[in-house]
Image (cartoon, coloured by chain):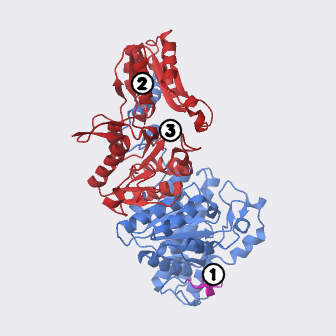
């Protein structure tokens, strides 16, 4: 199914599942999943939300230094990642826990990054999922370059690169659009418009809907209900198919909402109203799928309860493993700075080790 | 096989060899294709290797470096051209925040064998932003290597080493020396580019220089009444201070020369290291001959800004107590 480039449907977000949990049809996009897949999507979103809530609690207990919550963005993240093939590559910001989860990254590795025991956490080549990029927008250019490599290799691999509404102000994001367009790179630009760039509402710096900016760069843009996991999957699959066909990039704007603070260091009561959050709770991505599953008899109370129990047990083991994470060895800070030998750094490392061993000696003597 | 080549042609030959020996090597930059680059360093390579190996980029430096990182993650070995020294700054973010850190961040899983060629330095009568020496910024950053050749042979050897390195290398080309000729042995890499090399032996004063200032230092050595040992650093990061120390232990005197402003420049780091390692060998305080701490001046004033052999000779006289 091709990306819809006609203007007639543009001002409405693509939707296949309403906030009330009703399945609806769309003139350009549809999705045919098995009941098992529907149930699996529900389970993934429940686990991603649990991961997020556990991490927030662990930060409050001093077990993590910081946490950037993905609460409310589960459909956008799980749905877009569900659309990927195994060999596709995802480039993430620091909030895409749902994507990392779907790419098979062990959540403990994510926790290492926020606990401060590791810089990157996981091996990006193993999961075909880049480490979290903290500088806003950098990863968009890296993803476009990877996609350029896919076409130079004449492979059918594609790339998805994530960013937020705030990042659309960044030069790197706009340069990414230019480079992808120039080289018809097989990349999907997936913008989660969660309405807030820390304290700044996106309507303040987004004067034209984000998805329409694609026009100016010469490729299609699509607005999708980011809290509708089915629509997100359908649109992302279409964009990935377009990328693989050699037709070039697509910009997807997933309209969603950051239900928690920017990070655990942030206090959103200083800049936004509580009733905004209450409105978005009515559009919760997990609840609407749950209603649909129940209404169509795909899942029953027993299924939902079993998922909850499974998540409870899993969360407990996650908590325990975070609390017992080992500290990294001090001299490990010298590891892997360079791929090749560096005598200057080797000498510094040796001096550092000797310095610390000196303390061990004096301790033993005293 | 030894031939007489300009620095620009030696670089061109090194690029050609790199493209031939590894089909993952790509050249990427502004106007490097049909035009052959504004200094013609990539002349003829687009024609011979095609538009998928020698790629004209859009006019955006962060885009060039940022996409090259993705290409390298995919297994390519990009060799980038930044058109002029003063235009590297839009790419600074990608270089510092990503390029330098990815290997560390991924615990060695992702290597970024990217070479960024940057013509640098003054002396060509150019407008603003075309004559700068920003090497210190990059030498300061862990995870990057910084190389700069001074003559056709080192241009050839250093560039091949940079491209073959699995680490990111910032490669500064002395643009006002592009057309200087010299012998190039292209059957072998004659010296180790990561080591400083003695380009003229002497016994009274060690003069350390790099890039375009090596020629100036050699001119000073020709003109001086003293015996100057001239060292070409080649690698600015890592810094081969052991080779400098070996020389200073013999001469007891050190003069450091670079075009970049003196404040916190390479000379400051070298002076600190040698001041410590050669404290009892030094017969005189270490002297630095550098650009002044001003924005690069209009070209009609650049001869006053750039270190020349007279300023080096004054510094030599000073360390000799003359």
**Which chain wears red?**
B
Q: Counting residues from the N terminus, which is met first, the one under dot 3 or under dot 2?
A: 3
Residue A366 visible here: no
Asked if B147 appears above or below A284 in the picture, the reply is above
Picture coordinates of residue A154, whole percent (x, y): 35, 70
Chain hosting mark 2: B
- For disc 3, the marked residue is B121
Chain A shade in the render: blue
Residue nearest the observer in this picture, B224 or A305: B224
Chain hosting mark 3: B
Q: CA distance from mark 1 to mark 3?
A: 53 Å
Q: Residue at x 60, y 50 (%)?
A: A65
From the image, give the main secondary structure of the stretch colored magenta: loop
Query: Mark 1 vs mark 3: same chain?
Result: no
Residue nearest the observer in this picture, B101 or B269: B269
Q: Quadrant of residue B220?
A: top left
- For disc 1, the marked residue is A13
Q: Secondary structure at mark 2?
A: helix
Could you tell me if the residues under marks 1 and 2 are in contact, i.e. CB atoms within 8 Å?
A: no
- For disc 2, the marked residue is B219
State the mark number for residue B202: none
Q: Secondary structure at mark 1?
A: loop
Q: Secondary structure at mark 3?
A: loop
Dot 2 surroundings within 10 Å: few (below 14), some, or many (20 or more)?
some
Dot 1 surroundings within 10 Å: few (below 14), some, or many (20 or more)?
some
Tell me if A255 is positioned left or right of B318 in this view: right
Picture coordinates of residue B297, whole percent (x, y): 61, 36
The furthest residue to the left: B1
Query: Mark 1 vs mark 2: same chain?
Result: no
Residue nearest the observer in this picture, A102 or B176: B176
Foreground disc of the pair 1, 2: 2
């Amino acid at each position: 199914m091709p990306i819809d480039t006609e203007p007639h449907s543009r001002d409405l977000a693509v939707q296949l599942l309403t906030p009330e949990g009703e399945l609806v049809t769309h003139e350009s996009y549809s999705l045919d999943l098995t009941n098992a897949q529907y149930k699996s999507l529900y389970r993934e979103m429940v686990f991603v939300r649990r991961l997020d809530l556990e991490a927030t609690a662990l930060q409050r207990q001093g077990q993590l230094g910081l946490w950037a919550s993905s609460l409310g963005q589960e459909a956008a993240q799980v749905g877009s990642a569900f659309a990927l093939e195994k060999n596709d590559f995802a480039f993430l910001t620091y909030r895409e826990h749902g994507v990392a989860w779907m790419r098979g990254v062990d959540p403990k590795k994510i926790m290492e990054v926020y606990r401060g025991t590791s810089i990157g956490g996981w091996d990006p080549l193993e999961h075909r999922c880049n480490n979290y990029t903290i500088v806003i927008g950098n990863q968009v250019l890296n993803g476009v370059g990877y996609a350029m490599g896919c076409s130079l290799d004449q492979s059918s691999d594609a790339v998805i690169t994530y960013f937020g509404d705030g990042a659309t102000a960044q030069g790197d994001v706009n340069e990414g659009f230019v480079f992808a367009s120039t080289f018809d790179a097989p990349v999907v630009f997936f913008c989660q418009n969660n309405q807030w760039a820390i304290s700044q509402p996106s309507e303040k710096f987004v004067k034209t809907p984000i998805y329409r900016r694609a026009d100016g760069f010469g490729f299609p843009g699509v607005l999708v209900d980011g809290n509708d996991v089915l629509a997100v999957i359908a649109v992302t699959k279409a964009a990935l198919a377009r990328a693989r066909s050699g037709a070039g990039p697509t910009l997807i704007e997933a309209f969603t909402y950051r239900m928690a603070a920017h990070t655990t260091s942030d206090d959103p009561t200083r800049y936004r109203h509580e009733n905004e959050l209450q409105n978005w709770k009515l559009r919760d991505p997990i609840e609407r799928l749950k209603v649909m599953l129940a209404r169509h008899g795909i899942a029953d109370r027993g299924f939902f309860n079993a998922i909850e129990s499974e998540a409870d047990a899993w969360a407990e083991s996650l908590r325990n493993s975070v609390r017992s994470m080992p500290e990294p060895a001090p001299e490990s800070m010298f590891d892997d700075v360079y791929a090749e030998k560096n005598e200057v750094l080797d000498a510094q490392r040796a001096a550092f080790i000797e310095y610390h061993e000196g303390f061990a000696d004096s301790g033993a003597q005293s | 096989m030894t031939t007489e080549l300009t620095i620009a042609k030696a670089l061109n030959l090194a690029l050609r060899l790199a493209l031939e020996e590894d089909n993952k090597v790509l050249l990427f930059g502004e106007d490097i294709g049909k035009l052959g680059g504004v200094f013609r360093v990539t002349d003829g390579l687009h024609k011979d290797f095609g538009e998928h190996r020698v790629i004209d980029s859009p006019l955006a430096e962060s885009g060039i470096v940022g996409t090259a990182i993705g290409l390298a993650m995919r297994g390519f070995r990009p060799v980038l051209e930044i058109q002029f020294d003063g235009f590297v700054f839009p790419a600074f973010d990608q270089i510092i925040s990503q390029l330098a850190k990815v290997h560390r961040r991924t615990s060695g899983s992702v290597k970024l064998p990217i070479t960024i060629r940057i013509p640098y330095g003054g002396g060509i009568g150019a407008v603003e932003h075309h004559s700068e020496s920003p090497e210190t910024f990059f030498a300061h950053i862990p995870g990057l290597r910084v190389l700069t050749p001074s003559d056709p042979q080192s241009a050839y050897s250093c560039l091949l080493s940079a491209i073959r390195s699995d680490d990111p290398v910032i490669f500064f080309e002395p643009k006002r020396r592009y057309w200087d000729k010299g012998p190039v042995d292209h059957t072998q890499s004659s010296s180790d580019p990561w080591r400083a090399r003695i380009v003229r032996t002497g016994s009274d004063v060690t003069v350390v220089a790099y890039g375009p200032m090596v020629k100036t230092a050699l001119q000073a050595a020709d003109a001086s009444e003293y015996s100057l040992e001239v060292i070409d650093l080649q690698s600015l990061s890592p810094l081969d201070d052991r080779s400098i120390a070996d020389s200073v232990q013999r001469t007891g005197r050190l003069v450091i020369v670079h075009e970049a402003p003196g404040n916190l420049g390479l000379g400051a780091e070298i002076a600190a290291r040698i001041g410590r390692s050669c404290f009892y060998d030094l017969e005189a305080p270490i002297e630095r001959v550098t650009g002044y701490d001003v924005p690069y001046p209009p070209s009609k004033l650049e001869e006053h800004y750039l270190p020349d052999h007279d300023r080096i000779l004054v510094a030599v006289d000073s360390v000799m107590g003359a």
